[in-house]
Amino acid sequence: MSASRQPAAPRPMLWFARDLPNVCSLVGLLSAVLGVYFAIRGVFPAAMIALLWAVVFDWSDGRIARRMKGRTEGQRAFGGQLDSLIDLVSFSVAPAVVLLSVGRFSPWFVPGAFVIVATGVIRLSHFNVFGLVDDSTYRGLALDNNVIILALLFVFRHAVSAPVFAHVVYVALMALAALNVASIRTPKLGGRWYYAVTLYALCLSAIYGWQLLSG
């Protein structure tokens, strides 16, 4: 009896990471980590800049992947898993840390942080199994909207007292978390929306950059 054929040895892990769309995803992860770092330090303008660019890089990796030829099935599968895990960090963990920091790490803000991360995990797990409703429709609000809306909210941080603003952020993020796992259908944006999101990130980055320089 002949020995059973062994599967071919996979390529080294880092070989997949050097694929250009995956490099773009990892740059987005770096932006998210910087956002977490600045949020913990309480430097919210810098945190918002970093998280906004995490969104831009998240939108960019798919565009790059669709334009590249010769990618293997393994690279595409790896990229899909990498993108999903980075989304969890960028659009669930990072906003949860922002909430904790703006709430001065009060125990009352821990349940909110848990809800943000938990709904992110549930949403991404559901998406990884069931995918889109159709080619252009999500079930629930995509997680990147959490950062897009949060970054706009922080423009008005000094319009009210710090405790009031912390509770406004709390309520807003709980509403977004509910929408993330709701049964509503939302459009999968692409095309010209990519340029709109990039322009949005540039404009808010300019505002927050001015705040950093004037502060």
Image (cartoon, rainbow, N blue to C red):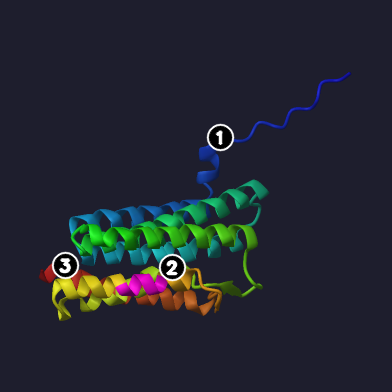
Q: Residues within 10 Å of mark 2 (few under 14, many from 20)?
A: many
Q: Secondary structure at mark 2?
A: helix
Q: Which mark is residue 144?
A: 2
Mark 3 touches mark 1? (CB < 8 Å) = no
Spatial separation of the CA atoms under disc 3 and disc 2: 24 Å
For mark 1, give the secondary structure: loop
Residue lying farthest to the left in this orientation? 215
Image check: 51 left or right of 139? left
Residue kind at label 3, given as amino acid type: Leu
Mark 3 near mark 2, Cβ–Cβ under 8 Å?
Answer: no
Q: Is residue 7 or residue 65 the one in the foreground?
A: 7
The residue where tag 1 is placed is 12
The residue sitting at 40% across, 72% down in the picture is 176
Q: Which residue is mark 3?
A: 212
Labels 3, 2: front one: 2
Question: Which residues lie in the magenta part?
Answer: 171-176
Kind of residue at badge 1: Pro
First along the sequence among labels 3 and 2: 2
- Above or below residue 77? Residue 153 is below
Q: CA distance from mark 1 to mark 2?
A: 30 Å
**Residue 175 inside the magenta-drawn segment:** yes
Q: Is residue 200 magenta?
A: no
Q: Position of residue 15 (x, y in %)?
A: 54, 40
Q: Main secondary structure of the magenta part?
A: helix
